[in-house]
Amino acid sequence: MRNDFLLPDLGEGLTEAEIVSWLVAPGDTITIDQPVVEVESAKSVVELPSPFGGIVEKIFGTPGETIHAGQVLITVVDPAHAVLDAAPDPADDSVPAAVPAAVPDTAPGVSGAVLIGYGTTVSTRPARRVVQGRFGTRAPTATATATATAPAVPVPVTVTTTPEPSPQAVIQHLDPSRRSPVVSPLVRRLARENGFDASQLLGTGRNGLVVRTDVQAFLHAVPASAPVVTVPDPLPAASAVNTPLASESVRIPITGLRKVVAQRLTTSRREIPEATIWLDVDATELFVARDRLLAATGERFSVTALIARFVVAGLRRYPLLNSSVDTASQEILQHGAINLGLAAQTPRGLMVPVVHGAHAMTTRQLRDAIAGLVVSAADGTFPPAALTGGTFTLNNFGSLGVDGSAAIINHPEAAMLGIGRMIERPWVVNHELAVRTVVELSMVFDHRVCDGGTAAGFLTFVAGCIENPVSLLAEL
């Protein structure tokens, strides 16, 4: 009996994912709910468990390849049927009968486990072995995994193994001047932990994409006498990213996260009649308040966390901005909870992780929640739940070195507040010229939801809190 494991529903309107690496190989014996493949969607990188137990007959797709929901990932056959299919003719006594394989000790049937809403409560996932090598700790290769999980009794099934790449074929791929595309944070991290930059390899994936097998092949191919050189993983120079050689043209596929962001921004521009207002604000007292908090509590509060506190208070006063438009029913849906999104530039691209229930948090809790998102933004590995349900977005594009922006609203939200860079500028204080720390706030809003008076009221409220943080006490 053969069972086909299909790519399950990824949720949130996602219909495709990219294969990062295979955790099994043809001929491996697997159990129900054992992870078999690692895939990367526009939301996150996950391991998919097989709803079937048995012997892997065939895998479909290679690392770096994009697969779609409903497409076959692997074919699993029942061990008993595999033996019967391969058994010789009983009349031919010159060939010994095949010995049946040991059937995994699992419950009958399938688990029904999918990416969303798992159907089992007891995990049957085997413990991962960790290989300690000269380059540090790394997961075992597919060949090592197949050896470790092979049944004690021989099974008459052909096992396909991948030969080790030759050092001559791999070492030449490491080139400090090369900038190959690396979209998977796991691949980038594996290379970084072993002392080199994955983009310096010549990728074997589609359009030169560096996949995990490229990094693993390089690790196996490096001779024992080779010195370990730690290579930093800085952002590529602007010229290397944006300016191709004069004699070459570059095609960059719009896939994965880039595709989802493109679709959302296009929908926002098409559906939302947005308007933008902005205001320069004296933020000197904000830094004074931050220093006083440190002195009083011994805890550090970031400027972004304090402004987020002001934004939540502002949305309480102007709740219409915490809304979305239901185009089907032609209604404005004013949300009760404030789920604050924070635009973040990550190695995977622009993402908006969400602090859920920000309206019910203290300033300390809000600070800690934002700090957790900042840590995850370092490699873009947010869980899917952290990227959904936002009702208002805070965008600190000042970290990119710009003062303001006519931003695109994060559909289906109704507004976004942008924070520019904070720099010293000449400012009039009490009719005298002084040097103050000034920031520009940019507010973009859906004109279907509210008029300029509401948006301006919210913006000036937040500005007032920045100029005089003590004024927020009246709102608590």
Image (tube, grey):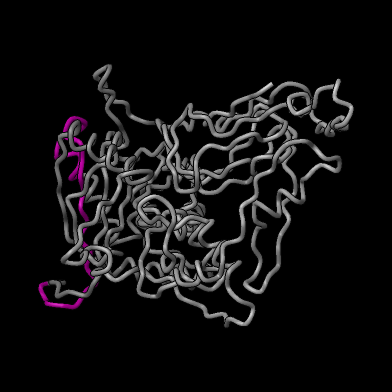
Q: Compare residues 368 and 28 and report the one nearer the observer.
A: 28
User: Is the residue 182 above or below the residue 289 in the image?
Assistant: above
Classify the position of the N terminus by image quarter: top right
Q: Is residue 214 magenta?
A: no
Q: Residue at the location (26% across, 36% down)? A: 414
User: Is the residue 394 above or below the residue 283 in the image?
Assistant: above
Q: Is residue 452 magenta?
A: yes
* Magenta residues (range): 431-456
Q: Compare residues 172 and 388 and report the one nearer the observer.
A: 172
Q: Residue at the location (65% across, 58% down)? A: 139
Give percent across and percent down for residue 160.
65, 45
Q: Quadrant of residue 325?
A: top left
Q: Residue at the location (72% across, 31% down)? A: 54
Q: Is residue 438 visible?
A: yes
Give percent across and percent down for residue 234.
39, 71
Give percent across and percent down for residue 288.
35, 71
